[in-house]
Image (cartoon, rainbow, N blue to C red):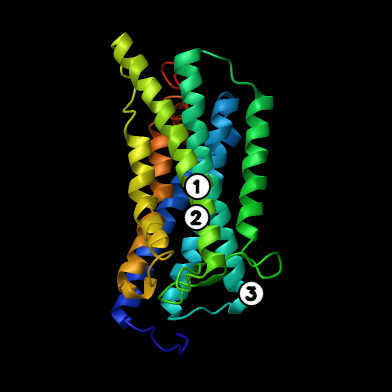
Amino acid sequence: MAAYPLPEGFSDADMTLFGTALLVEGLLGFFLNSIAALSFILIKDQRNPSNFLVFNLNIADLLLNVNGLIAAYASYQRGWPFGVDGCNMHGFQGLVAIFAAICFVALVSWDKYHYWCTQQEFYWATSGTMVVCVWVASIFWASLPLPSVLGWGEFDFEPMRTCCTLDYTKGDSSYISYMLTITVFYLLVPLLIMHSSYDSIYAYFKKTHKFKFNTYIPEATLLATWGPYVAMCIYACFENAKLVSPKLRMVLPVVAKTSPIWHALLYSFTNEAYKGGIWQMLTGQEPAKKIKSN
């Protein structure tokens, strides 16, 4: 194990505990999302424009799983072994994954709204254009804090110094303007899309007396996983974030990084339009009844 000094506020047992949490959630999320992504690639019937959005959500979550596994490795090493450039790349890669995943869960809700409420056909051209726009925009916004790009905001270590993210401890004008901007574009706008979409779907289900799925869960999942962490980052815009205990500041991103697990379960393994392909890939048997529900 590398001879790094323990960060302030953490014991050796804390480093092991947080590292294990990151390892378990990273491996579980990677396993679930890998199965879901492979089913899209291998099962022909799985490949349609709607499922393409879910597939890209799987890919975004796999990137976040890799980000968490790197942090788990560093936790067992008791320090960050990849230098300053590695920290910047780790923070950049994490933001790309987060931005893309949140956009894709919003687009899935938008697609479900049109499927249930307007019955509009979803074309490959539309799905493909959305996917390209999401990835390009995510890479663009995540690259802005890089010192070689613009340095708007800045990447630095989390309190355990084993993973890197947007530095919320400075609370300067650069951080505040960047943080508030991405909060609007990558949390409030997606939440608005999800809320309006699922609210309309719920009204349709209520009208027809046929409830196909719980329309409350997707929005609640996003808020439960990323809401507390974003709230802390917003708090850092107005107060000194170092007043919050280091352990709490580490718990929040660890909770947020469970989102790939919930996404896989919610959008792939319990999605009627997706789970049939997963079953066929794992067992070699086609589903007893071909499901067309979204």
Residue marked by disc 3: 85
Quick check: can you spot residue 48? Answer: no
Left or right: 43 in relation to 116: right
The residue sitting at the top extreme is 208
Q: CA distance from mark 2 to mark 3?
A: 25 Å
Residue 208 in the image: x percent, y percent?
Answer: 32, 9
- Mark 3 vs mark 1: in front: 1
Q: Residue at x 43, y 58 (%)?
A: 26
What type is the residue that disc 3 sits on? Asp
Quick check: can you spot residue 96? Answer: yes
What type is the residue that disc 1 sits on? Val
What type is the residue that disc 2 sits on? Leu
| Nearer to me, 204 or 86 | 204
Q: Quadrant of the N terminus?
A: bottom left
Whether the residues at callouts 1 and 2 have beta carbons within 8 Å, the answer is yes
Residue marked by disc 1: 184
Residue 135 in the image: x percent, y percent?
Answer: 64, 45
Q: In the image, is residue 38 above or below residue 114?
A: below
Which mark is first along the chain, 1 or 3? 3
Residue marked by disc 2: 180
Q: Residue at x 37, y 38 (%)?
A: 219
In terms of secondary structure, where does tag 2 sit?
helix
Q: Residues within 10 Å of mark 3 (few under 14, many from 20)?
A: few
